[in-house]
Amino acid sequence: MASNSTADSGAGDLFQRKATGLLRGWSVLDGFIYASFAINLITLGLYIFSFAPFIPDGSLVYAIILSGLYLVFQAVTYASLIAVMPRAGGDYVWMSRVLGGGIGFVLAVTGWWFILWHWVPIYANILNIEVFVPLATIAGFDGVANFFGAPGGMFTASMVVAILASILISLGMRTYARIQKFCFYGGVIGLVIMLALLLFNSNADFVGAFNSQAQDVYGAGGDAYQRTLDAGSVKGTNLGALAFGPTLLLIPMIVFFNLWSNWGATLYGEVRGASDFRKNIYAMGGALIVTSAVAVIMLLLFAKTFGWDFYYAANNAYWGGNGPLSVWPYPGLFAAFLFDSPILQFILVALLALWFFGWVGSVFLSSTRVVFATAFDRVLPEWVAKTSRNGVPYYALMLMLLPSIPISYLYAYGENFATYTLDATLVIATTFLGSAIAAAVLPWRKPEIYNASPIARYNVLGLPLITVAASMFSIFLVFCLYKWLTDDTYGINNGQSLIYMMILYVVALVLYVGFRLLRRAQGMDLNMVYDEIPED
Amino acid sequence: MISKLFSQEPETRVFFATDIHGSETCWRKFLNSGKHYEAKIMILGGDMTGKALVPIVEEAPGRWHATLLENRREFESEDEVKEFEDSVKRRGYYPFRTDPDEMSELESDEDLRNELFYKEMLGTIERWMQMADEKLDGTEIECFVSPGNDDQFEVDEIISSAKRVRLAEGKVVEFGDYQMVSTGWSNRTPWDTYREEDEEDLAARLKKMTGQVTAPPEKTIYNFHCPPYKSGLDDAPEIDENMRPKHGGRSIVPVGSKAVREAIEEGQPALALHGHIHEAKGNTRIGRTLCINPGSSYEQGQLLGAVVNLDGGKKVKRFVLTSG
């Protein structure tokens, strides 16, 4: 037997022996990279920023800064949950152990499984407008670009997303982690090139390049830049002045981009202390703050080179359907226009596309984990957690892939179905609210587990840090939920969509009650799953 | 068939837990698990011993300090020290009282540290066996324990000496019509632990053991600490040469034993019980065999386990994974 003294244990003043599972600390940089993919500036960020003209008086820049800073509470909440219940399997296990099996199942299954079917067409839309259409346009394949702009293209892109995500998960986490890292570094190169182009070119350079490319690529003749300004002019666009009320109203919109720093808890070695807790905060909070900072820099460069009024006008004109260009005003493509060479334009857009391809697996990955966790708790049947000999979770994948096909079809071709999916973010936020409440009450609901955790020593004004952070995060979520449900601006308070989402919750509840009764009839009370055994 | 599916009373109910690594809380919960889950058979898989020693240093008469989870604590009374010692034990570490001089020696002398580890680990197992004898005395519960790859060989002797706990390592044990064969040996690990060997040697060991089973497969249980290769019960974070998780712990690789997998594929017992990889909680099927790894959260004081109803059918269908 060999033992180590404290120096490299990462756990403080103790002695460790050599034993299975004792690992040294994980890399914060790695954690940061994967969290950065979740708060994906290029895909989610640029897409949702394009809706900012709907609240023209709000400052997008300040909204990103304020929400980015505030959502550190989210990072602290989830880092705390991980510290108290590591290897727990995420929101489902935290909620089911702290709040009860039924609440945990219904909120997690709806928020991490059912709703992710509806995110497939959302991912597909981003794939179309940021990857397929711009690349096809640059390459001169106008027919391809037109196809992906139509319902058939939407459905095709949805299938590409669903199949790609399934393949990435089938390849296993080892390969997927490597692909993500490759995409991250490639995507960062693309981002740096884009920012450099914006930094070193003037507004006049851009106006010339835009007019020229609009003519060459889209056949939009004349002064397309000015025509865009005329078509999409937004009164009161506000880059820097802090109009607090309207800026606050932008926050429930941009959480589409920055609410996901907690997307995927990782596994850790044992005999770890508060350093792992801090590392999680650095990784998740760091990704949040750095991504927010880059977003702000990017927007300031948009203002400098595109012109802020133009950026808003281009988006406003597109959503209003009256711009000179019929395609979504993708800033990555606009930056690429500053290259004369179509090859360089193609390379830049392709590099930026790596932000999509490193991220696309997330549409199914967490869902398969929730499906597994519920099956291991015997709520769902055993077969859903089956894997192939190569570890492919084929049933869980089928449970994601198959429903996503008709949903994508209806989204692409249905007249009203896209409306039903408007509440997709709301449902996930509700799941997060469940976890935040679980975190807030955890010190009282599970005092022994909490007191044995490395975060038990952290208090704020006499209250546990986890309670304070989770309460603050809950307030944030309640604010967003209230605004989504009451304010027409967000396009979410749609009766049909709410009814549709309620049906999803009811289906989850019926599944839970049904399987619970079945297990009881089989002589296996599911209370055993969550019951604590007395110690004495 | 339907009546069997819905029959309430099992022929035999088993509770299985594993990898408690010195956690006093988990051991106490394990001793209560039979009564709690109405299981007549309790089985503890391997790795009972802890992984860390926590020194409580007396810096001046009546004044102590110690660090747990990077939190430095100072004590000025015996009660405070005792309370701290209990919290260390609950987590699975071994507290010991020392002074600055001895601390210096321990830091510089690996043999001394190892000696202390032995003393604490074996002393704890002895104490645990006494607790088991007291707790299980007068009950009908049968308790089987087999050490794991992290447990030194002296642990076997101590378990053997217990009255109400039966050592299961390396032999066929019986309860009712069922036969169970157990081993804590695993394939090679990066930690060079006590009971690990090359796959060929492990295969030979398993073949010898399973060859002694005379019960039919539906009445047979394999209690092999190491999970089968590529079963999903053996997924662990990939680590680099410095024992750091690669890719922030996201890169997961199978680390189980091919020999164990072959043994299960060949013998097709009704149930295979595993541990070893704490993160890989779950269940799977290899042919007809239900394979379970309940995982471990010993540091949190949670006893992860599995309640299994054995009905003597070709497939075990009634079970739940618990987090008690």
Image (cartoon, coloured by chain):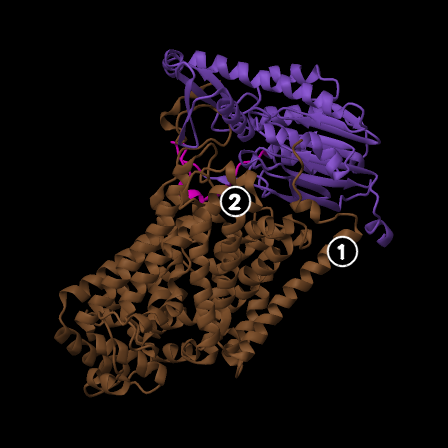
User: Same chain, marks 2 and 1?
Assistant: yes
- Looking at the image, which is closer to me, B290 or A113? A113
Q: Which of marks 1 and 2 precedes in the sequence?
A: 2
Q: Label 2, label 1: how many angstroms apart (C-alpha)?
A: 33 Å
- Looking at the image, which is closer to me, A379 or A128? A379
Does the magenta portion include B37? no
Quadrant of the image containing the C terminus of chain A: top right
**Residue B205 on image: x %, y %:** 65, 23
Task: Look at the image and give the residue range highlighted in magenta.
Answer: B239-257
* Amino acid type of the residue tagged 1 in the rendering: Leu
User: Residue A143, can we see it?
Assistant: yes
As drawn, A244 above or below A12: below
As drawn, B324 above or below B132: below
As drawn, A397 above or below B104: below
| Pointers 2 and 1 in contact (C-beta within 8 Å) | no
* Amino acid type of the residue tagged 2 in the rendering: Pro
Chain to which mark 2 belongs: A
Tell which chain the image draws in brown.
A
Residue under label 1: A518
Q: Residue at x 65, y 46 (%)?
A: A530
**Residue B121 on image: x %, y %:** 56, 19
Residue under label 2: A443
**What secondary structure is the stretch in magenta mostly built from?**
loop
Q: Residue at x 63, y 63 (%)?
A: A508
Chain B: colour as depicted? purple
- Mark 1 lies on a secondary structure that is helix
Q: Which mark is residue B92?
A: none
